[in-house]
Amino acid sequence: MIWILAWILTLIIGVWLLHKSSGGLSLNKPNLHLVIFGYVYLLSSLIGSLLIVLEIDHSYIINKLLFPESRQLGFILVCGSFLLFAFTTVIVSKIIGFKPDLEFNKYWNAPVDEVFLSEPNKKLFFRIFLGLSVISILSVIYTLLHTSTIPLFSALLGHTADLAKGRIDAKEGYTGIVYVKNILAIGLTPLLSIVAFAYALKTRLWSWRVLFGLLFVAAVVIQVYNFEKAPTLFYMIMLILTSIFVGKLKLNLRLILLFTAVGVAYIVVMYTLLGASGSSTFLNYSQGPIGRIILTQIAPMYIFVDRFGEVYPFLHIYGLPDSILQLYHVDQMRSARVIMMDLFPEKVQEGTAGVLNTLYVGEAYATYGVWGVILGTVYLGVFVQVLYVLFVRLPKHPVFLSLFVFFIVNIPRAMVGGFSDLVINPVWIVLFTIVTFPYAVVRLKETWPKSIKKVKKSS
């Protein structure tokens, strides 16, 4: 009973804190904090943690715990990290003078503004953006040509027997330039399509509509080619959020149920192609899609807590992001890889398993123990709130709006995928630079002559 009470109090206090720091948690006005709470903490962590601490989880991963007390410690870390994250966002708002209710509502009600006043500057922006779009589409084609096994094609041809192994082969059998694949194809193409979608909704010009159509096809292909289920689903969520932020779509119960039904149908089809069958598999809370979300996502974190500090030593600097360690010529040791080899060595040898990702708390704990979780959570709270305030205060231009939507979806995804990529993510930095490049060029062109005239007058 004490665990249930602690869970309920955690939920109430955490939601209240996030409501204060974001300006509201509402399905009618979705924001970054709502998605983090709903996806990262509620669905992917808190529900499963309650089942685990009550020992009614029926999880094949939790059955591999060596120390029974890891259930309690893991539960405390999940609840504590949620409260600390929410509390940190409130403190950051106080420090930087952010008024969530006023500023977020002002941003929400503001019209999408193209900013560029003259027709030549609008055309210049489109031409630069078109050039980036051509590069990203060609990068998708390049990636497919340099991938030895494409599970999507196998599924379309009816060869579904080896899809699980084919997904690993698609990652490890890539022979091209890795930066072209990860940044220009997988990263840039969906993001550019979101910008084009926002422009198409705002301007209704055929040039933007056609460009969005081409980018949409390329984005869907590059996200589903290796037959991963989540990327395409999250991409569709980004399109929905963009429509909402532009003001072309208003959520209601009917639409929410419709989108949910479509998402469930998509997941069922993907699981069926991967070999799942029977209603018991899909409806069981510890198996299938439901179990994958509420239990399988958080269960590995308990293994991290169980093994590191007892079976394996804490990683310390070796668990830090690879982008940092490369500066000192130190090789990173992925705790998610260590845990996968511990639990499923045969799958690793077969080439059907890589890393065992989970809530960021797992990697943070494997690196520096409880202190790693505390410091990592505070860092995340600061990072998320500063980024949130930045976008709320930026102009509601299609570029910045699309980047806002991108982070609303991808920060929560990263939080349940580990911790090292959240400390510093070079791909996000590069994508932000590339997407804002056309905007920066045109804005500079607009302001540069005015600056020169002011200098001449003053002299």
Image: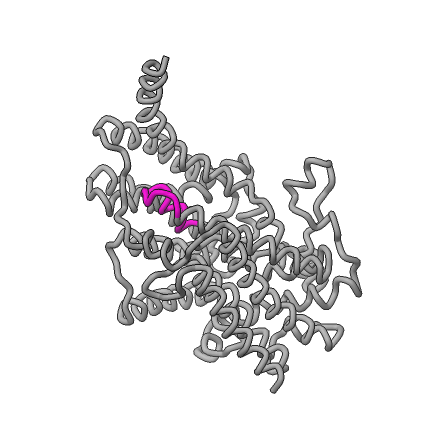
What percent of the width, then of the height, locates residue 125?
Answer: 30, 31
Residue under the image location 73 percent in, 60 percent down: 369
Residue under the image location 60 percent in, 82 percent down: 56
Residue under the image location 35 percent in, 68 percent down: 260
Identity of the residue furthest to the front in this view: 458
Magenta highlight: main SS? helix
404 falls in the magenta region: yes
What percent of the width, then of the height, locates residue 250?
Answer: 26, 61
Q: In this view, does 450 lie above or below 139?
A: above
Q: Quadrant of residue 380?
A: bottom right
Residue under the image location 34 percent in, 30 percent down: 443
438 falls in the magenta region: no
Closer to us: 141 or 12: 12
Q: Quadrant of residue 377?
A: bottom right
Q: In which quarter of the image is the C terminus?
A: top left
What percent of the width, then of the height, locates residue 62?
Answer: 65, 73
Q: In this view, does 456 lie above or below 204?
A: above
Which span is picked out in magenta?
Answer: 393-406
Closer to us: 364 or 179: 364
Q: Is residue 210 visible?
A: yes
Q: Is residue 165 visible?
A: no
Q: Is residue 211 left or right of residue 295?
A: left
